[in-house]
Amino acid sequence: MKLRSLFAAIALILGVAVPAFAGEAVVERDSKETPKEEPKAEEKKSQDFEALLKEVDKVVTLNFTADDVKFFNDNWVEITKALSADEKFRKLKDENVKTCFDYAVTVEAFKKWATDKKVDADATLRKGMRIVLQHLKLGVDAQLKMGRAWIEAQRKAAESKKETMGEEKYKKTIAALDEQTKTMDGAEKGFKLVPDPTEAEKKLLEDDSDAIGETVATAQQAAAEFDAKKEGAKEGTKDGMK
């Protein structure tokens, strides 16, 4: 899983604003391009993975089996849709994984889905979140190492072009890289809070890594499309009031 995909997946589970660790090079932008606005306070807060993952050990308490992984791959997208449709869930998702979970298990659409499937809503969500977070944790060290190397390369590039960039643009570039480093530090600390999988779980995650990754990505896309529709509806309402 690529670095941007990794954090996008975290975003799906925790409502985190995805940082631009990969993609365009910070110092290679057109000098005429309008600088992006600094992240708002709430966006910076949403990037605090350590706070978001606090008490995660109280959520992912149930071990999963091969049958659970298959059920996850077959149903996680539908679970995501059921939860994403709830307005209060969307408001709570940026706060903390436990706060989010505690409310998620009360969402009527999700409870109805679980009843129709004849499964326990609480256990299903606990196991599903354990699968996702431990799947991410297994690859996070390598991905963060890649991200830190990318940031270091950007710092060196900025230093080499400092005179031609100008003082103001140089300072903004370094500040942006510092912000990304802080976010990565938070992700590293946050994932230390996620319990390690058992040996049996680790084997299941490794053996079915591609399928799990595809499930997470599909669910992410479904949630993003849902959010885009909601935002579009809000904009349409605002335009109609003008």
Image (tube, rainbow, N blue to C red):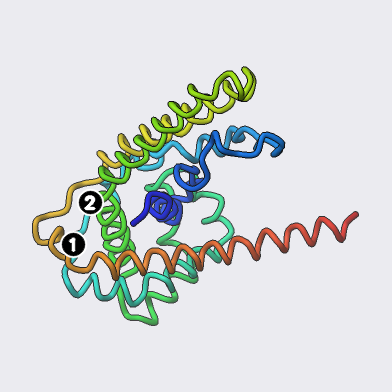
The percent coordinates of residue 9 (x first, y second) are 40, 55
- Residue 76 position within the rendered picture, expressed as x and y whole percent measured from the top left: 37, 70
Quick check: 165 left or right of 136? Answer: right
**Viewer-side residue, 118 vs 182:** 182
Q: In the displayed structure, does residue 165 sit left or right of residue 221? A: right
**Quarter of the figure with the C terminus:** bottom right
Residue 101 visible in the displayed image: no
Residue shown at 10%/61% (left/top)? 200
| Residue that numbered label 2 is attached to | 138
Measure the alpha-carbon separation of dots 2 and 1: 9 Å
- Residues at marks 2 and 1 touching, judged by CB atoms closer than 8 Å: yes
**Mark number displayed over residue 206:** 1
> Dot 2, crowdedness within 10 Å: few (<14), some or many (≥20)?
some
Q: Residues within 10 Å of mark 1 (few under 14, many from 20)?
A: few
Rendering coords of residue 163 (x, y %) = 58, 18
Q: Amino acid at mark 1?
A: Glu
70 lies above or below 140? below
Whether residue 237 can be seen here: yes
Q: Residue at x 26, y 50 (%)?
A: 139
Give coordinates of residue 62: x percent, y percent: 21, 58
Identify which amino acid the numbered label 2 is placed on. Leu
Image quadrant occupied by the N terminus: bottom left
Q: Residue furthest right?
A: 242
